[in-house]
Image (cartoon, helix red, strand yellow):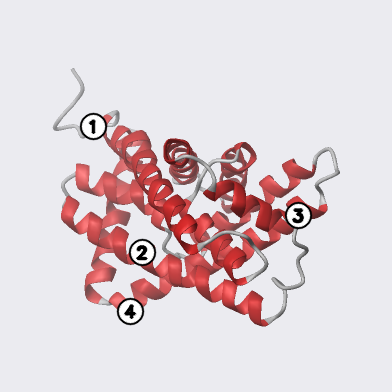
Amino acid sequence: MIDRTYVEKAAESGVRKLSLLQSDPGRYLTRSVLAGMYLSIVLFVFWNLSHNLHDVSIGKVVASAFFGVGLTIIVFTNAELFTSNNMYLAVSSVEGRTSWGQTVLLWGACYLGNFVGALIVAGLLYGAGALEALPLDHALYSGALHKVHQGAAAIFFKGVLANWVVCLAVRLALRCKEDIAKIAVLILVVFIFLYLGFEHSIANMGTFSMSLLGNGQITISEALFNLVFSTLGNIVGGVLFVGIPFAYINPSEENPPR
């Protein structure tokens, strides 16, 4: 029943997250804001690596591998990320430890905090002149433009795939006892979704915020269009592809598989 232990661990994490939101919403929202900030500053490095290593044969590999640093920072600092919480709260709700209504409330609070964090980092980069210094053909701007010009179905399914991978990384990290193993798992698995160009709603918040404040050519309405469908896809990927199956295939002793 080793895997069952990790289901219970994930469910307990969901309960703790909800308890913190209910008892100290300011602290919970701060953790959410920090997650958005951590991911966005790493994202800025990712786009710069993508641009500067564009002509290098393994440039995309290097840039994609680096992005896992963002999730690693979030996990090790107890920050709150919307996409991984899609899995945690799905497990706790399936286990009957939280309700689905409470789950949606927490997701909303976490999403808002992540968005504020992305805006803060974009604002800091704008104030520092870092966005203005980027050329018009920079990978950040071309990447943002590509993201908003996809169809709704493509964005949705890429969102499903993105959070399936991200939540798999978090789910595997639950089994790691050593920090170095946890770091390796997070970086290597998250590499998959970046390298394949899937859609992560919180990362997109950072990309779009930086593009809008810099020399990008996207509009707010285009950014919101992407965020709606990438967010829905992320929820499906985290809940239906990881959270619920995680609990279902590892039942409690009171409800053994037939």
Query: Could one spot residue 252 in this view of the protein?
Result: yes
Q: Badge 3: how crowded within 10 Å, few (<14), some, or many (20+)?
A: some
Which element type, helix, strand or loop, lies under badge 1?
loop
Q: Badge 4: how crowded within 10 Å, few (<14), some, or many (20+)?
A: few
Query: Could one spot residue 39 in this view of the protein?
Result: no
27 vs 76, left or right, is left
Q: Which residue corresponds to mark 2? A: 110
Q: Amino acid at mark 3?
A: Leu
Q: Which residue corresponds to mark 3? A: 49
Camera-near label (3 vs 4) is 3
Quadrant of the image occupied by residue 94: top left
Instruction: Name which residue lies at 36% across and 64% down.
Output: 110
Q: Nearer the viewer, residue 197 or 221?
A: 221
**Mark toward the start of the polypeptide (2 vs 1):** 2
Q: Amino acid at mark 2?
A: Cys
Can you say whether 105 is above or below 148 in the image? below
Which element type, helix, strand or loop, lies under badge 3?
helix
**Mark toward the start of the polypeptide (3 vs 2):** 3
Picture coordinates of residue 199, whole percent (x, y): 51, 45
Instruction: Name which residue lies at 36% across and 73% down.
Output: 29
Furthest residue toward top: 258
196 vs 7, left or right, is right
Q: Which residue corresponds to mark 1? A: 251
Q: Are marks 3 and 2 in contact (CB under 8 Å)?
A: no
Q: Which residue corresponds to mark 4? A: 26
**Mark toward the start of the polypeptide (1 vs 4):** 4
Q: Badge 2: how crowded within 10 Å, few (<14), some, or many (20+)?
A: many
> Disc 4 to disc 2, how far (Cα)?
11 Å
> Disc 1 to disc 4, how far (Cα)?
35 Å
